[in-house]
Image (cartoon, rainbow, N blue to C red):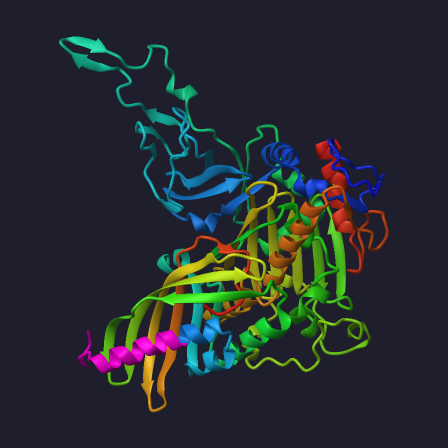
Amino acid sequence: MSNDTRIPLQPVWDQPDTSRIPFKVYTDEQTHQQELEKLFYRNHWCYVGLEAEIPEPGDFKRTVIGERSVIMVRDNEGMINVVENVCAHRGMRFCRKKHGNAKELVCPYHQWNYDLKGNLQGVPFRRGVKQDGEVKGGMPKDFKPAEHGLTQLRVAQRGGVVFASFDENVEPFEEFIGPQMLHYFDRLFNGRKLKLLGYNKQRIPGNWKLMQENIKDPYHPGLLHTWFVTFGLWRADNRSELKMDEHHRHAAMISTRGQGGKNAQTTNVSSFKEEMKLNDPRFLDVEVEPWWNGPTAVMMTVFPSVILQQQVNSVSTRHIQPNGHDSFDFVWTHFGFEDDTPEMTERRLRQANLFGPAGFVSADDGEVIEFSQEGFEQKPFHRSLAELGGREIEETDHMVSETLIRGMYEYWRKQMEV
Amino acid sequence: MNSTTMNMEIYLQLTQFYQDYAAAVDAADWDSWIEMFADDCTYRIQSRENHERNLPMAALSLDGKGMLKDRIYGITETIFHDPYMQNHVIAAPRILGLSPDLIEAQANYAVFRTKNDGIAQVFNVGRYIDRIRQTADGLRIESRICVFDNDMILNSLIYPI
């Protein structure tokens, strides 16, 4: 890319590969609108929640796909449906509660009511009003309620996790995830019932892709996050692998905790603190669980909407909810498993202190995303660099590589046709 | 109200304690902040959503002074973040229970955040739900749960509320 300081009019990607990323992909509102259409509303499965959030018939949760409000609801047959939160009549975003239990979905404006699958059941005064022996007003005789339901999304459930898509022609969920990533998905969600522990929510003033990149970037955790490097949770000398699906859109960073402490790897790492000792070691009271099958951390990015986290005993989903090109809401849903002992639940809750908006580790990530966005906005004609580990896209057996970021942008360019 | 009757002295003492707390966190005087807690204390910052739905998750959940010290080490030494000032406005406490050695009280709070190049923002608004011990050395927090109304934390929450 040239050092020309004019802002280009067209989306620009004048490099043959994706080792350079134009700042404009983070700063352009039109690009953002296209991303919503091409990545969130078409062709992709997006995360909506966990089955455990709506255990009973009538339970619902309001959430979003991209920037469209949707309702995930369990019907009387126990099936999970996802419908768009826009009334078929006058378009009102009618559901205001974040969660609850309902027998039907009703828009208060004119009391159009829908069953828990989103089918229109009733329209007040459909047949008009009787006055002086005459029927006045009402809907035309050819009005067909069946044609005026809520927008019903396609739904996929696996291992207690619910995804949905506005796209009727989206490929089957298992194909979307791909066999390589499905292996890691099933490792975490292996059929045990999930137990909801609660939420952490933060509004991060940065482009949503930066969050995907953050979890496709194994370079930073051992440098930015003092806790990770000092206690050996994530650092360059840990045994690790970087894997992708065949399209390079989803990825997993897989790592096994080392011993921590000082060695050749830490001598150049300023965030390493040899003298750091916890006053209360319960923050890192790790208990190995059988389902791990080795790795102590698997961080999985499912493009475009969610990150699935296992960091030792802390397991969560992190839902990416864009609002504009320069901001997204980041919703963490922490959970455990039905067979967890009270001690394990306690452990998961304690280790959650490392994560989320106040986390010993994750607070850093929100901050660097905010400051990256500031850098992009001030010189949108510029580009960032992602060539650690080369300019190619390949799986690795180490973490000193930005290959997953290059892979994501290869896919992004194909989808966005730039 | 429990057995002991409220008197002006206890109310003034408690009010002063709350204002001392605000002054300590606003001045980033973390040693004083830690000393306001009992050794076996509980300190949580939890969203109202989790609190009202009886979900145990909290943005921060610390038990015992050791964890408080580790948090302070984190915010001063290990967490990378934009520096900011805090300004706490704590409403008059509401005493809900009183016994010779324990005060159960609540107080609304608003925390304004001002970054280095910035203008004060409403950062966190909520309510303290407290159990405060009356000890020979003065009042000490046995348990403080900061239940905040904000649905979203504005990016990161670094300092104690």
Residue closest to the eye, A266 or A32: A32
* Furthest-bottom residue in this view: B136
* Furthest-left residue in this view: A132
Which quarter of the image is occupied by the N terminus of chain A? top right
Whether residue A379 sits left or right of residue A360 in the image: it is: right
Q: In this view, does B32 lie above or below A105?
A: below
Tell me which residue sits at (25%, 77%) in the image: B11
Tell me which residue sits at (45%, 61%) in the image: B112
Tell me which residue sits at (74%, 39%) in the image: A411
Query: Can I make out residue A362 in this image?
Result: no
Which quarter of the image is occupied by the C terminus of chain A? top right
Residue B6: in magenta span: yes
- Counting from the top left corner in percent of width and height, residue A162 is at 52, 44
Whether residue B28 sits left or right of residue A96 in the image: it is: right
Q: Is residue A168 above or below residue B72?
A: above
Main secondary structure found in the magenta portion: helix
Q: In this view, does B25 lie above or below A254?
A: below
Asked where in the image residue B93 lies, by quadrant, the reply is bottom left
Q: What stretch is highlighted in magenta?
A: B1-20
- Counting from the top left corner in percent of width and height, residue A358 is at 53, 64
Total tally of numbered discs in the picture: 0
Asked where in the image residue A298 lies, by quadrant, the reply is bottom right
- Counting from the top left corner in percent of width and height, residue A168 is at 57, 28
Tell me which residue sits at (37%, 10%) in the image: A142
Residue closest to the eye, A187 or A222: A222
Residue A218: in magenta span: no
